[in-house]
Structure formats: structure tokens, C-alpha cells
């Protein structure tokens, strides 16, 4: 029995995709006609060879597929995980719309065949080609209706390359309309650090800032556009930037609230906007007091984080005295079920 008394549901883990595997699941003519290409299917995040650096530091886990993911879940009293891309987090940087459509379809097929069909404990999030909104609508519908995916991921930062509009831009509204119709939440997830004005910093500084800066930009764009008014039941998560930036942005948006259709405070406390947390962040208590304890998700970030760090994170969060046991269960389990509308009981004991 887990010491928590229930099993965790991981709101943000990562699949480890590989081009040779993706190609096997792409539509023709790509499946048969790319032989030893010199360029990766997805753009690199920022020019840093992160896998090589992880390997040099002894932190790379090697190949991670469905089996390795299930072994990880079993070893950490985690019931299930919601899988996001790794290389695919740079999807917004793709310049060629036709390729974006092809590789997103291939990724979604690959994730379904190699992970989701292996176990119902592995849950999928669809990758969308926003470069072609009409095709993105079709792919979202297919991913949810045919492949059983529970959300769609959109890029927090496209480095002013493939996508040159913020996510609140009206060209993307047909995607949000379809997501609302399907009761499918939208997850904004960062990774690329290019184009944020941080290139003069060392890699650690760029990685430190890439998520919160990108999420601030996207939240602001979505608020200013009136998107949250247009789609009043759409749920949106801003992932991997922690929680401390959200109360700050609430204050900043209130200062300029005359430019907004919706009241930013009402929108941010409506229960429709979620975020993931770091277990030890001091501001987590403040964020929950300002927003709600109902909108914070636990995220393992496996395989990007070493398992020892993940074990420490779970212990730190579960041992915090400024967060009640009820709030911990919400973070570790219930909020993830609510955001993704997962068909699992709110309470379930871990073996």
C-alpha cells in the first residue's frame, strides 16, 4: 500500500519518440520514401544536444518505450500517466505546413500503436499541426474519436518560426471550437528556448526561463484575444512552468484589465485554467490560495527527469506541512482526473 493511501496519476510524462519509428507510422509517400535522411523530423529545441549532455552526465535512461514506462509506474506507486511528446515539443517551429500535418499524424499513430494499445495506464495527448488550422481540426477529431486521446498539446514557444502568431490568435479558434465540442482540454507546453531573448545566457539560464516566459506570453495572448469568453467551457493547462508565475500574471493582467473582454481574475479562478507544480516551490501555497487547490497537477516529467529526482519530488510534496492531505490528493490524483476527464475513480488505493 502506498503511504499516501491512494495511487498517483501523473499529469505530464513524456514519450521518447524516434524518427525511424515515426516513419513506420506515417502516411505515404513519407513512409516508403525517406531513406536515411540527414535532417531530424522535428526541429531541435534550441541548438543544444540535450540527449548527449544527459548521457555525458550519466542521466540518460536509455531507450524508453511502453515497457520502460510501465516499469517506472510500478516502481513509484503511480497508477497511470498522460504522455506528451519530447522531440515533438518543437512542432511549432516547423516551417512547412504540409510536413507539420504529416509528422503530427505519424506521431499520433505511433503513440497509439506503441504505447496506448499496450496498456490503458498509458494515456495519450494529440500533437496538432497548427500551421494548417483546418487540418489541425481534422487531426484533433481523429485523435480523440479514433485513437482515444484525451487532450491536445499546443506549443508555448515556436521561436517566431513556423507559427508566427500567439495562441490566442483567431486563426486558431476553429481548433478550440472543436476541442470544446469534443470536451477535449488544450495543454500549452513549452520546451524551445529560442526567440525569448535569453540566448545570451548559459544553457542553464535559458532552460530555467524558457517555460515561464513562454507561458506568460501565451496566457496574455489568449486573454487579450477574448478566447476564454468565446469558448466558456474549454479547459486549458499551462504546463512545466510551475505555479508562481500565475498569481503574478493575475496582478499584471488586472492592471491592464481595460484591454480585456473577460475579467482576468474571474477567468483565472474559474476552474478552467490548470498548471503543474514543483513539489518544493514555496509559492505553491500562495498560488492555491489565490487560484484554487483544484487546478494544480502533479507531473513526473519522466523520462526527462532521473527517477531518483522524481522519488525525491514525491516525498517532498507528500511531506509538506503547509498543504493539507486533501489538497495533496487533489494534486497527486483528483485534479488530473478532472482536467483530462479520465474514466477512473477519484479515489483508488495503490497496491
Image: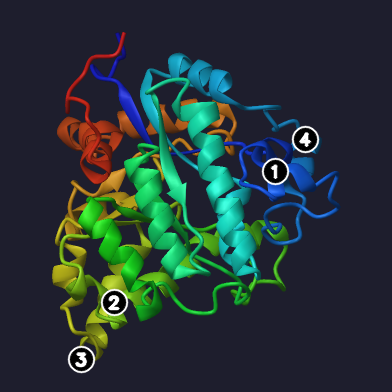
Q: CA distance from mark 3 to mark 1?
A: 51 Å
Please determine whether, in this image, residue 226 is positioned above or below residue 155.
below
Instruction: Tell me if label 4 and label 2 are in contact, CB under 8 Å.
Output: no
Question: Does the rendering let one see residue 172?
Answer: yes
In the rendered image, which residue does mark 2 sit on? 223
Q: Residue at 45% across / 51% down in the picture?
A: 240
Left or right for 212, reference 268: right
Instruction: Specify the quadrant that holds the N terminus.
Output: top left
Mark 3 nearby-residue class (10 Å; few <14, some 14–19, many ≥20): few
Spot occupied by residue 44 in the image (x, y as percentages of width and height): 71, 57
Q: Earlier in the sequence, mark 4 or mark 2?
A: 4
Left or right for 150, reference 291: right
Please determine whether, in this image, residue 134 is positioned above or below residue 1.
below
Q: Earlier in the sequence, mark 1 or mark 4?
A: 1
Q: Residue at 72% across / 63% down in the picture?
A: 202
Q: Residue at 52% across / 24% down in the picture?
A: 69
Name the secondary structure under disc 4.
Answer: helix
Which-is-in-front pick, marks 4 and 2? 2
Mark 2 nearby-residue class (10 Å; few <14, some 14–19, many ≥20): many
Spot occupied by residue 134 in the image (x, y as percentages of width and height): 42, 67
Q: CA distance from mark 1 to mark 4?
A: 30 Å
Circle on res. 55:
4
| Numbered label tally | 4
Instruction: Tell me if label 3 and label 4 are in contact, CB under 8 Å.
Output: no
Name the secondary structure under disc 3.
Answer: helix
Q: CA distance from mark 3 to mark 2?
A: 12 Å
Instruction: Specify the quadrant that holds the C terminus.
Output: top left
Quarter location, residue 7: top left
Circle on res. 31:
1
Circle on res. 258:
3
Q: Residue at 79% across / 42% down in the picture?
A: 52
Amino acid at each position: 500500500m502506498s503511504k499516501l493511501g491512494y495511487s498517483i496519476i501523473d499529469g505530464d510524462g513524456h514519450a521518447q519518440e524516434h524518427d525511424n519509428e515515426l516513419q513506420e507510422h506515417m502516411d505515404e509517400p513519407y513512409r516508403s520514401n525517406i531513406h536515411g535522411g540527414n535532417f531530424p523530423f522535428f526541429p531541435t529545441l534550441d541548438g543544444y544536444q540535450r540527449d548527449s549532455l544527459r548521457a555525458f552526465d550519466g542521466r540518460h535512461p536509455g531507450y524508453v518505450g511502453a515497457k520502460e514506462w510501465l516499469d517506472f509506474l510500478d516502481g513509484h506507486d503511480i497508477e497511470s500517466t498522460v504522455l506528451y511528446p519530447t522531440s515533438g515539443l518543437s512542432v511549432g517551429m516547423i516551417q512547412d505546413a504540409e510536413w507539420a500535418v504529416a509528422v503530427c499524424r505519424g506521431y499520433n499513430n505511433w503513440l497509439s500503436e506503441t504505447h496506448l494499445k499496450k496498456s490503458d495506464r498509458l494515456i495519450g495527448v494529440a500533437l496538432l499541426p497548427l500551421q494548417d488550422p483546418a487540418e489541425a481540426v481534422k487531426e484533433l477529431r481523429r485523435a480523440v474519436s479514433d485513437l482515444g486521446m484525451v487532450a491536445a498539446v499546443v506549443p508555448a514557444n515556436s521561436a517566431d518560426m513556423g507559427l508566427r502568431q500567439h495562441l490566442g490568435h483567431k486563426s486558431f479558434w476553429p481548433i478550440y471550437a472543436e476541442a470544446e465540442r469534443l470536451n477535449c482540454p488544450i495543454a500549452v507546453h513549452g520546451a524551445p528556448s529560442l526567440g525569448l531573448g535569453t540566448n545570451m545566457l548559459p544553457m542553464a539560464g535559458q532552460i530555467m526561463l524558457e517555460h515561464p516566459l513562454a507561458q506568460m506570453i501565451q496566457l496574455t495572448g489568449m486573454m487579450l484575444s477574448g478566447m476564454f469568453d468565446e469558448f466558456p467551457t474549454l479547459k486549458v493547462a499551462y504546463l512545466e512552468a510551475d505555479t508562481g508565475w500565475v498569481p503574478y500574471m493575475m496582478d499584471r493582467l488586472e492592471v491592464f484589465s481595460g484591454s480585456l473582454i473577460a475579467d482576468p481574475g474571474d477567468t483565472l479562478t474559474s476552474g478552467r485554467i490548470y498548471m503543474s507544480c514543483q513539489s518544493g516551490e514555496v509559492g505553491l501555497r500562495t498560488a492555491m490560495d489565490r487560484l484554487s487547490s483544484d487546478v494544480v497537477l502533479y507531473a513526473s516529467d519522466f523520462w526527462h527527469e532521473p527517477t531518483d529526482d522524481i522519488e525525491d519530488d514525491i516525498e517532498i510534496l507528500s511531506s509538506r506541512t503547509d498543504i493539507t492531505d486533501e489538497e495533496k490528493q487533489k494534486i497527486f490524483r483528483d485534479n488530473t482526473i478532472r482536467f483530462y476527464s479520465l474514466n477512473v475513480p477519484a479515489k483508488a488505493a495503490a497496491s
